Every structure is written in structure tokens, then in C-alpha cells.
Image (cartoon, rainbow, N blue to C red):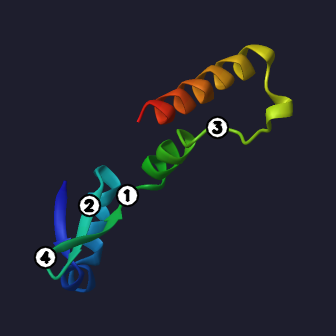
Amino acid sequence: MARYTTSDLSRKSGDIITEALRAPVTITQRNKPRLVLLSIEDYRRLTARGDTRKPGTLASMSDKDFAAFRRAVDGYVAEGEEG
């Protein structure tokens, strides 16, 4: 991944944008990575793969999932009693 400083961003923004359209670019500040500049297509591809988990409650769990949950809790409790 190409790296540029925040100073470079001020002076060479056109070149950096052109490069970021091809591949993500790291922007550093005081020699530490601070930002990543990437194309909107890359951004959309990354966010589309986001976390698909949904919150739920014990009441909304299937019987199979609740039984697995109960076994996990029982195992955790048993470990605590041994220690």
C-alpha cells in the first residue's frame, strides 16, 4: 500500500487521489498511519461485508440454540466450581 504524509496530501492531492482510485493509500502523520484513502467502490465493498449479526433475546432463540446456550453456561459454571 502506498504511503504519504499529511504534508504530501496538501501538496500532491491530485496524484494521491489518482493513486487511491487504483488501490488504498495510507496517510501518515508523525510517521504513524492515521488514515486510509480509498475509492468509493472499495469502501462499498468493505461495508457490504459488515457484521450481519442481529441482536436477539432468549425468548426469540430457537429451542436448538437455547439448548446449546444452556450447555455452554452449564460448562462455564462447572469450570468455576472446579477452580
Which disc is residue 3 wearing?
none
Given this view, does label 3 or label 1 mark the residue nearer the observer? 3
Please give the name of the residue rendered at 28% of the width and 77% of the height, measured from the top-left corner.
13
Q: For this rendering, which residue is in front, 27 or 19?
A: 27
Q: For this rendering, which residue is in front, 27 or 20?
A: 27
Image coordinates for residue 23, horizontal then vertical, percent? 28, 51
- Secondary structure category for the residue under label 2: strand
State the separation of the CA atoms marked 3 and 2. Answer: 30 Å
Count of marks overlaid on the render: 4
Given this view, does label 3 or label 4 mark the residue nearer the observer? 3
The residue wearing badge 4 is: 31
Which disc is residue 53 wearing?
3
Residue 32 is left or right of residue 79, and the answer is left
The residue wearing badge 1 is: 38
Mark 3 and mark 1 lie on one chain; the one further toward the N terminus is: 1
Whether tag 1 and tag 2 are in contact, CB under 8 A, the answer is: yes
State the separation of the CA atoms marked 2 and 4. Answer: 14 Å
Please give the name of the residue rendered at 80% of the width and 38% of the height, measured from the top-left corner.
57
